[in-house]
Amino acid sequence: MLRKFIKPSLALLLLTGLGACGYSPGHRALTGGVIGAGGGAILGSATGLGAGTGALIGAGVGAGTGAATAR
């Protein structure tokens, strides 16, 4: 069971670092949302929550985090 979470968690961790890339808050929100959606879909599929639900949650969190970060 633990093996199911290692690769998606590692991928999400690596992609999270890219969430603050961008020159404006809007651009960071967009990139954060896209990265969060991808990571959320992966984790949602691995946990049984569902890829769509995971993508929606991840996109919201990623966009919020990207918009809130400074340059």
Image (spheres, grey):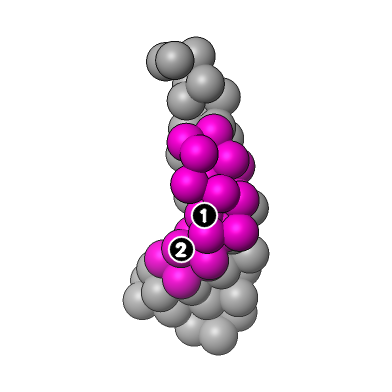
| For residue 25, above or below residue 40 | below
| For residue 68, above or below residue 45 | below
Name the amino acid type tagged 1: Gly
Q: Residue 40 at what x, y percent from top left? A: 53, 51
Q: Which quarter of the figure is the C terminus placed in?
A: bottom left
| Residue in view at x 46 percent, y 71 percent | 60
Q: Which quarter of the figure is the N terminus placed in?
A: top left
| Residue in view at x 42 percent, y 15 percent | 2
Residue 57: numbered disc: 2
| Residue in view at x 49 percent, y 83 percent | 25
Dot 2 falls on a residue whose secondary structure is: helix
As measured in the structure, the alpha-carbon distance from the residue carrying label 2 to the one carrying label 1 is 5 Å
Q: Main secondary structure of the magenta part?
A: helix
In the picture of the structure, the residue carrying the numbered disc 1 is 54
Residue 17 in view: no
Stretch of the chain drawn in magenta = 39-61
In the depicted view, which residue is nearer to us: 54 or 27? 54
Q: Residue 45 at what x, y percent from top left? A: 58, 40
Residue 59 in view: yes
In the depicted view, which residue is nearer to us: 19 or 44? 44
| For residue 70, above or below residue 36 | below
Q: CB under 8 Å between callouts 2 and 1?
A: yes
Q: Residue 27 at what x, y percent from top left? A: 60, 79
| For residue 58, above or below residue 31 | above
Disc 2 crowd rating (10 Å Cα; few below 14, some 14-19, many 20+) is: some
In the depicted view, which residue is nearer to us: 19 or 10? 10
Q: Residue 53 at what x, y percent from top left? A: 52, 59
